[in-house]
Amino acid sequence: MTAATRRCPACGSDIAGPADRFCENCGRDLGATADPPAPTPPPPAAAVTGYAVLPLTAAAAATPCDGCGGTGFDADGYCAGCGELRSPPDAGSADLGAIQLSTHRGKVHAHNEDAVAATVVADPANPAGPVAIVVLCDGVSTSSDPQAASGAASRSGVDGIVAALAAGWDPVQATRIGLDAAFEAVRATAGGHHNAPSCTYVSAVVRRAPARADVATMPEFPVVEPVPEAGAENGWDGPDSGAPQPDAGPAIGQYSAEMSSERTDFVALPDPEAGVAPERAAAEAAPGREAAEPVEYEVTVANVGDSRGYWLTGSESAQSRRLTVDDSWAQLVVAAGQLDEAAAMRDPRAHALVRWLGADSVDSAATTEVHTHRVRGPGVVLLCSDGLWNYLPAADDLAMVATATAAGAAAHALVDFALDGGGSDNITVALVPVPLPGRPHATTTPWSRTGGEHG
């Protein structure tokens, strides 16, 4: 994502190139935040079975000094051998079982300004399965301390969703509460900066769908790749559930009046009889055995900016599709019929944001649409920054990589694809396989490449 000019957060001087690590005027480390926020633990009220934040903190990654290779650092992060400030780690991965994360700074930027936070929690409404929660943010590189914005937003968003679910809110309302917490967290990073830290935001809450008496076939969510055509609607206005919501206390109770009307969209469901593996078909055709109906999952998504969410399936009988609509200049001119998609994406203004999180943003959770999609696996939910979709925007093309291997290997393969394509931006990927695995766990590691070395 781009904006007009990159400036030093300390003195305001223009920065010559995107790879510059220090301000030539005042010497400020352009990768360090003035007051880096500490990682926020998940709320203790939730039954959390896994939690991860990327990129890792410098202390967690135990990275050696860039200047001399030493491993001794003081409390402020300066090398004991040469005095150079430790660089934050710019790549890594995390395995939560039900969620796979991978991030890399790419080949051009000096630092990774993306951030992703994820957790797996018990579902209070459905003891049969967990809930996977992911928030992915991309720092606006021309704002001050973009990694402070993306880090604060991703952590606060996940923690807000977890707290809201634990209090009894449904995923749509919990998504709004998490987004509101992210907006506030990013505003709090502004401090005295004249160019407020800013970022994008995309979130997903994935859970096994609650049983319902009647499941009607709903209209498809008409998103066109890479951006919707002129006049495309964002979705179908679904009926309100009318279910009473619990009193969650003053921290989140204020949102009840703002959530009276939500939109529910449905991904086209595959034909249960199509594309069934031969061994499964034979088992289901056995005498006295009824065919098993695929389990439905709910995917609740929200986005601000141009980080994206996708539903991807390798099945020929089901459609992969994008679940979010970009808040960008390219999206606006294509929707208005002023340019076709190819021309809009070639324009230097293509990635200019019209909505973002930041102290200078006029947007809020109340002005952001939240959509719930019902899907049947096998498939994966993908959240990614534009560092990936710049190289692979179409859902069908992403599905060929994302569903070819297990989710952990696929996350690395997607990052590798963007690196091999040029790596012009930070790259961050989150994959949630559907159906969700039954035994969540948590492992966080430094970056490991699946496709060889990348310069």
Image (spheres, rainbow, N blue to C red):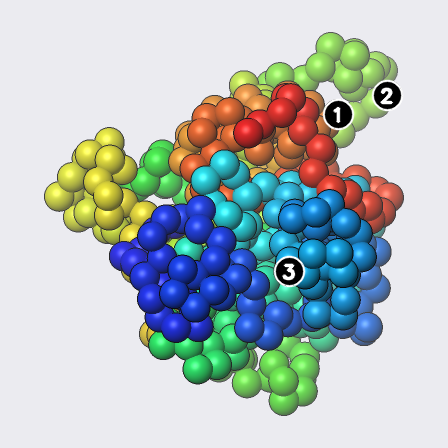
Label 2 – label 1 distance at C-alpha: 10 Å
The outermost residue toward the left is 338
Type of amino acid at the residue the image marks with label 1: Ala
Q: Residue at x 82, y 16 (%)?
A: 283
Q: Answer with left or right where residue 29 lies relative to residue 331.
A: right
Q: Is residue 112 above or below residue 263?
A: above
In the rendered image, residue 280, in percent from the top left (x then y), is placed at 77, 17
Residue 436 found in image quarter: top right
Please tell me how crowded label 3 is: few (under 14), some (14-19), or many (20+) other residues with Cα within 10 Å.
Answer: some
Front one among 52 and 372: 52
Q: Answer with left or right where residue 218 lies relative to residue 416.
A: left
Front one among 313 and 243: 313
| Residue occupied by mark 1 | 291
Type of amino acid at the residue the image marks with label 2: Gly
Label 3 – label 1 distance at C-alpha: 62 Å
In the rendered image, residue 272, in percent from the top left (x then y), is placed at 63, 26
Q: Residue at x 27, y 57 (%)?
A: 4
Q: Is residue 81 above or below residue 360?
A: above
Please tell me how crowded label 1 is: few (under 14), some (14-19), or many (20+) other residues with Cα within 10 Å.
Answer: some
